[in-house]
Each structure stands twice: as structure tokens, then as C-alpha cells.
Amino acid sequence: MDPRYQVQLKIRKPAAEVFAAVVRPEKLSSYFVQAASAPLAEGATVKWRFAEVPGEHDVSVRRIVNDQLILLEWAGAESGHKIQVRMTFQPLDAGATLVQISESGWRDTPADLAASHGNAGGWMHMMCCLKAYLEYGINLRAGGAR
């Protein structure tokens, strides 16, 4: 078995605006991460810090297609092997974008399966926060950390 998943959500903003909200650290830290060390740029390794999880997490940017695609790689929670994250931004019309996030590379072990399920929920939460931020100017994560 090859554990993987995909989550998706329609955001009522143009693809360029949605894409920028993920790539630019000042936007990303307004709804998702506590801090990001730099913009997502192909070939870069960026450090993300989350309020709920101790430490900084290396995010390696493997590929960027402006306003369409972000491919990331990071260490799996339990085993430390590389997990691939694929984000796509599909324009539905001039004012709406379908965001899809998938993660693959998990091992078929109980620990990795549990971690992958947690990440699936985390990415869905991220997209809900992105939607609230872009459509309504609300930071759903504010005050949500332990």
C-alpha cells in the first residue's frame, strides 16, 4: 500500500491571489504558520514555525509554477523520511480557485499512517484558514494554540 491523500477546497479569489497567500511569508503567517523564514521559491529551503508544534520545520521547495503549482518536501513526523506535498491552484472562473493539496511518501506503518491522517486534517484546516483569511479577513488560528 502507498499511503497518500488529497484534500481540496474552493476559495472565492483569483488563483494569483490565492497562490501569493501561500508563497509569501507575511501572508502565510497571517493565517497558517506562526512564522516563515522566506518566500517559497524553487530550490529554497524555508523554515516554518507553528504555534502548536515545537521547533522549526524545514520545507524544501522542489518546484514552483507561478499561480498553478507548488511542490514541497519535508521530513515525516515519525520516521524522518521525505514526504512530498503537492499544491495545485486551478482557476474555476475569474474570481474562484480550486486548491488541492496532496501528500505522499508515507510508509505503510501504524506510526506513519497516524501521522499522515493528522497531516490530512492539518492541510484541510490550513485551507479553511486560507479561505477565511482571503474571503473575510479573519485569522481562524489566532488564539488557537495551547
Image (cartoon, grey):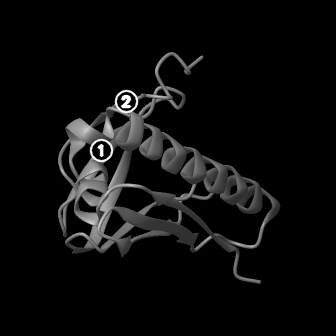
Residue 22's place in the image compared with 73, above or below, is above
The quarter of the picture where the C terminus appears is top right
In screen coordinates, is 91 left or right of 51? left
The amino acid pointed to by label 2 is Gln
The quarter of the picture where the N terminus appears is bottom right
Image x and y of residue 64, in percent: 24, 72
User: Which of 144/60 is in front?
Assistant: 144
User: Which of 67/54 is in front?
Assistant: 67
User: Which of 43/13 is in front?
Assistant: 13
Q: Quadrant of residue 60?
A: bottom left
Residue 34's tag is: 2
Image x and y of residue 95, in percent: 32, 62
Kind of element beneath mark 2: loop
In screen coordinates, is 54 left or right of 90? right
Residue 63's tag is: none
In front of the other: label 2 or label 1?
A: 2
Image x and y of residue 70, in percent: 32, 69
Q: Please give the residue where the numbered disc 1 appears in the rendered image.
A: 47
User: Which of 114/95 is in front?
Assistant: 95
- Label 2 neighbourhood size at 10 Å, few (<14), some (14-19), many (20+)? some
The amino acid pointed to by label 1 is Lys
Residue 39's place in the image compared with 129, above or below, is below
* Residue at horizontal 76 percent and vertical 56 percent from the top: 111
In screen coordinates, is 29 left or right of 25? right
